[in-house]
Structures are given as structure tokens and as C-alpha cells.
């Protein structure tokens, strides 16, 4: 029951739902995916294009994986921060 009340669980679930929504083709211009994926923001910068590659060369499954991983890490950080505050 404690897992359902965690930020890690909910942020990861929302990220997965957004990726599934984009993958299904309903988000054909990837607007929702772009607005909710900070790693995708970085991939679209001029710096990333010059240093690595253009975002269109990166497979979508990699973008999905990085987005889900990003939100899982953010959720874990929030959970640990709140746990630390509760113990004080």
C-alpha cells in the first residue's frame, strides 16, 4: 500500500501513459510528449544537435525509456526528500 502512495509510482505511471499515448499515434505532433519530457527538451537544443546528433536520429523507444527513467528518478528523489523530512 505504501508503494501506491509514492511519487515514484505515480510519476512513472504517468510517464508510461504519456509514452503509450504518443506511441498509439494520438499525439501525432508529439506535443504532449514534448511538454512533459525534460530530456526531450535537452535533445532539441542546439548544443545537443552540435555535440551529439539530431533528435530525429534517435529512436523513439530510446526517448520513451529516457523519459520514464527521468520521471522515476525524480519520483525517487521526492520520496527520499519527504522521508527525510518526516523523520525529523
Image: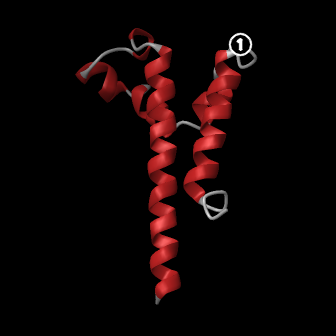
Q: Residue at x 62, y 27 (%)?
A: 19
Instruction: Tell me where residue 29 appears, x and y as whole percent.
Output: 66, 16
Which residue is more in the foreground, 58 or 45? 58
- At 48% from the left and 86% from the top, the residue drawn is 87
Position of the N terminus, as image quadrant, is bottom right
Place of residue 14 in the rendered image (x, y in percent of width and height, measured from the top left): 66, 41
Judge whether 70 appears above or below 7 on screen.
above
Q: Does 58 sit above or below residue 51?
A: above
Write down the residue under mark 1. Answer: 25
Task: Please report the residue visible at 52 percent of the width from the left and 73 percent of the height from the top.
Answer: 82
- The single residue placed furthest to the left in the displayed view is 51
Q: Nearer the viewer, residue 81 or 47?
A: 81
- Depth check, front residue: 53 or 81: 81
Quadrant in which residue 5 is drawn: bottom right
Element type at marker 1? loop
Residue 77: which quarter of the image?
A: bottom left
Amino acid at each position: 500500500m505504501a508503494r501506491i502512495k509514492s511519487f515514484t509510482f505515480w510519476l512513472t505511471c504517468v510517464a508510461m501513459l504519456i509514452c503509450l499515448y504518443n506511441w498509439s499515434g494520438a499525439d501525432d505532433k508529439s506535443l504532449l510528449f514534448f511538454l512533459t519530457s525534460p530530456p526531450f527538451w535537452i535533445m532539441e537544443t542546439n548544443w545537443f544537435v552540435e555535440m551529439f546528433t539530431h533528435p530525429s536520429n534517435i529512436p523513439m523507444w530510446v526517448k520513451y525509456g529516457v523519459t520514464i527513467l527521468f520521471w522515476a528518478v525524480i519520483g525517487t528523489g521526492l520520496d527520499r526528500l519527504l522521508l527525510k523530512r518526516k523523520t525529523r
